[in-house]
Amino acid sequence: MVNRVDHSGSVSVKDLAVQFDVSVETMRRDLRVLEEKGLLRRQHGSALSLVGDEVGLAFGQRADEQASEKNAIAQKATSLVRAGDAIMLDASSSSWYLAKVLPDMKLTVITNSMRVAFELVSRRKIKTLTIGGEYSEKYGAFLGPLATSQVGNFCADILFFSCTGFQEESGVWESNEANAAIKQSMLRSAERSVLLCDSSKVGKSGLIRLCKTDDLSRVISE
């Protein structure tokens, strides 16, 4: 059952009950036991994988996943960037792919990602502003209350960000609490928000809802 949830990221209790030929109530009890053992998380009538949460993949591993899809998304996203824009990039691997293909033109890039900052250091026309705080080697990012509060000092034309999961009916989801906090602050600090979402994240949810689908200016997928 845990393998099934990990493979899909999120599975409804009803679907699991049908697959394993048990009642919904029995499935709820089984999932409660698995959650107590720290093997998954229950939320809103679904079982959520912990892959991608605090015990999930580090940045380097995430960057290697769906690489061609993320590159295609990044290429599409560049069409939204205009000279003179102030753009905000989160610490997702999708934003790093976007940083790699940003044209060297007059831009201001605000980011909490060390890898994005390093990627842009040689772009002479791009001004890079980094958000400080507690550095997470795993995520290659500055996170925590200090970083989150600093975001509010900026105002960006466009935020480009990614997530743990996206469901059209329920919105954009994140599993890591520290990442969720800074992304929510970024959403409040940007005029427009663009979700970079490869197909592996569609239909999945997470621990924390970042925003509703209607709050997004655009969703870019491969």
Image (spheres, grey):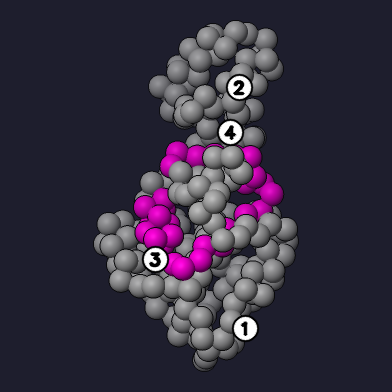
Q: In the image, what residue occupies the spot 43% across and 60% down?
A: 187
Circle 1 SS class: loop
Amino acid on which disc 3 is placed: Ser
Q: Which residue is mark 4?
A: 10
Q: Residue under circle 3? A: 189
Tell me the mark number nearer the camera, choosing from 1 and 3: 3
Task: Please provide percent x and percent y for residue 77.
Answer: 64, 69
The span from disc 2 to disc 1 (Cα, nearest Å) is 46 Å
Which numbered disc covers residue 1? 2
Q: Secondary structure at mark 3?
A: loop
Going from N to C along the chain, the mark reached first, 3 or 4, is: 4
Which residue is disc 1 drawn over? 103
Residue 53 seen anywhere in this rendered image of the structure: no
> With respect to residue 192, does 42 lie above or below?
above
Circle 4: is it few (<14), some (14-19), or many (20+) Cα within 10 Å? many
**Residue range (magenta):** 179-208
Q: Viewer-nearest of labels 2 and 4?
A: 4
Residue 211 painted magenta: no
Magenta-span inclusion, residue 198: yes
Q: Quadrant of the C terminus?
A: bottom right
* Residue lying at the far bottom of the rendered structure: 124
Q: Earlier in the sequence, mark 1 or mark 3?
A: 1
Q: Position of residue 220 (x, y in %)?
A: 65, 60
Indicate the amino acid at tag 4. Answer: Ser
